Amino acid sequence: DQQVKQNSPSLSVQEGRISILNCDYTNSMFDYFLWYKKYPAEGPTFLISISSIKDKNEDGRFTVFLNKSAKHLSLHIVPSQPGDSAVYFCAASGSSGTYKYIFGTGTRLKVLA
Amino acid sequence: DAGITQSPRHKVTETGTPVTLRCHQTENHRYMYWYRQDPGHGLRLIHYSYGVKDTDKGEVSDGYSVSRSKTEDFLLTLESATSSQTSVYFCAIGSGEGEYFGPGTRLTVT
């Protein structure tokens, strides 16, 4: 049973436009969420996080929105750049104290020049 | 970059042979993790450690064991490799604010 879902396996966006990547979760105990970016043949790299006490967190071109009632989070990239082309994973963690993260299946973003 | 290395980076082995993958960190993080990445499945947690000699199972632990005798090293062992364990394996170190991943090990079991 997939507790963290990324229902769009791929997304193509024109350079300069907004990219919106979505993530849904089922476990209401999750209280910390992260986004990772992964290039081919490399390990995932941390991008941005959000705690459940917030509904928005911004870092430069990247903004994560959290809608707890809908159990939904999204990552907005504005403006999108060709270097943003990668696989994006969302991950969630509960307040169990074990720092275990459940990852989604990933969305491949392609930014077209 | 977080100081995480994995060895070997690539390995081809035969079904039924034992395989050990090593993760080494220089960050003195308490938490260490092993994941596997497969198409359509994303990253799935195999085992994790929350201290020296303290380990626990993740969601896909069958066929794998781990050991952590020092803070800096976390070993993943496939006791008898099977073709279903062909994958890319990532080690990560973590804190309460996220995890930092190593470069990965591509394992092929023939």
Image: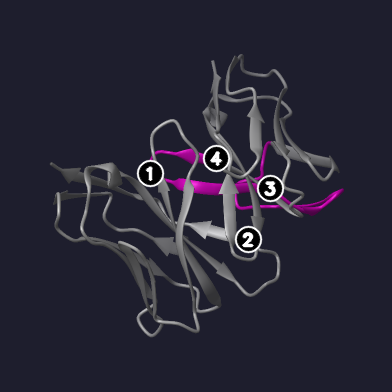
**Residue receiving disc 2:** A100
| Label 4 packing within 10 angstroms: few (<14), some (14-19), many (20+) | many
Q: Does the magenta stretch include residue B45?
A: yes
Q: Which chain carries label 4?
A: B
Whether discs 3 and 1 lie on one chain: the answer is yes
x%, y% of residue A42?
46, 35
> Mark 2 — on which chain does it sit?
A
**Span of residues in magenta:** B36-63
Residue at image coords 44%, 72%: A26
For disc 3, the chain is: B
On whether residue B60 falls in the magenta region, the answer is yes
Chain where mark 1 sits: B
* Type of the residue with mark 1: Gly
- Residue B1: which quarter of the image? top right
Question: Mark 3 touching mark 1, by CB under 8 A?
Answer: no
To which residue does mark 4 refer?
B36
Dominant secondary structure of the magenta stretch? Answer: strand
Question: Given the image, on which type of amino acid does mark 3 rest?
Answer: His
- Tell me the tag on residue A105: none
Residue receiving disc 3: B47
